[in-house]
Image (cartoon, grey):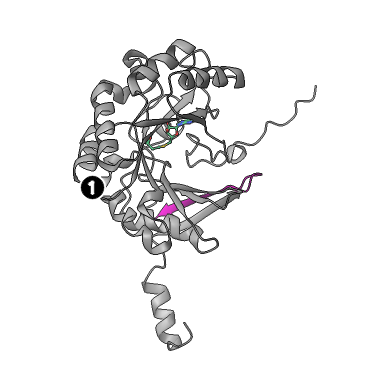
Amino acid sequence: MTNLPLALRTALEAEVPFSTLAVVTEQQARDGTVKTLFRTHDGHPVEAVLMRYRDGRRSVCVSSQSGCPLTCTFCATGAMTFGRNLTASEIVDQALHFRRSVPLNHLVFMGMGEPLMNLDGVLGATRRMPAIGITHRRTTISTVGWMPGLSRFVEDVAEPIRLALSLHAADPALRSELMPVNDRYPLADVVALCRTHWERTNRRVFVEYVMLAGVNDAPAQARLLAELLGRDAFKVNLIPYNPTGKYGGSSREAIATFKAELDRAHVPATVRLTRGRDIAAACGQLAAVPRARAPEPVSS
Ligand code: SAH
């Protein structure tokens, strides 16, 4: 801003931070996906991911918390220390970081944290997004089914924001094993609220279902899922498991068979494209730790 006196520019630079977040590192995956690690002014790590698709979609995946207090067994974020909720500005600044180099048109709250534990921060940020080109219809909030935030979201929020539910198992006992939060809020209540969101907005709720070999990927489990969801209000996104240690991912064939069961029951389903796995930027891999180096070859 050379129209301002140099002394003022210098003072502004020193005293008014340009962003609430400082960039620590940035990595680019082979598929072009970019992952950025930031630090808040009080030292909490935050990651965000930019995904570019051939059809022109440019989607930013943002974090709503530093770390996550929930402990889903398949997710790396749950294993790091929980910091705190992020402010609306700290969420907006993740998107603005990428927006400086490329125009954005989609935003998903699928980074670190549980967005509906931080509804005020998340809504505050969402409401500022249209100003940078991301409409509410192209904004998705993903939740484990955190009821206090979910009921407020479904009952009080008028904007046509897309909702996604991380479901992963239709059988409550299995879901509790995978996601301890399931003991707190019965799945039937969560699904009923999601259905209300569909009734009010006429927008299908996306169901995220990570495919774990021999755990939740049997055809009978697909039929149970179809029964729970019905044909009208949901669309299932089958997510290939991104390795985080504990499980094995379902084979291509198992995923196809599972999807065929959903097709037969007329439940819409797609398989999610995996992006950024080589830099640990894919679903469930955000843990704010530098990528482990490949082991040195052992010589005898
Ligand atoms: N806490 C919210 C927002 C995070 S979204 C939620 O859980 O919905 C991140 C998505 O990636 C969730 O659907 C999560 O269940 C899924 N996920 C977590 N670990 C994964 C893994 N290792 N492989 C694939 N998907 C994973």
Image quarter in which the C terminus is found: top right
Task: Give the quarter the ligand 1 occupies.
Answer: top left
Q: Residue at x 25, y 49 (%)?
A: 120
State the image coordinates of residue 295 (x, y, percent, origin top left): 68, 31
Res 79 → quadrant: top left
Residue in view at x 55 percent, y 28 percent: 243
Question: What is the residue that sits farthest to the right in this orientation?
Answer: 300
**Region rendered in magenta:** 28-41
Question: Is 207 placed left or right of 300 in the picture?
Answer: left
Q: Is residue 32 magenta?
A: yes
* Rendered location of residue 182, percent (x, y): 30, 23
Judged from this view, the residue extending furthest toward the top is 220
- Looking at the rendered structure, the kind of residue marked 1 is Val
Whether the residue under disc 1 has CB within 8 Å of ligand 1:
no
**121 or 202: nearer the viewer:** 202
| Image coordinates for residue 46, horizontal then vertical, percent | 43, 48
Please give the residue where the numbered disc 1 appears in the rendered image: 157
Q: Is residue 13 above or below residue 82?
A: below
Residue placed at 53% from the left, 27% from the top?
Answer: 241
Is residue 36 shown in magenta? yes
Label 1: which secondary element: loop
Task: Report whether residue 31 is seen.
Answer: yes
Name the quadrant containing residue 173.
top left
Nearest the viewer among 184 and 219 is: 219
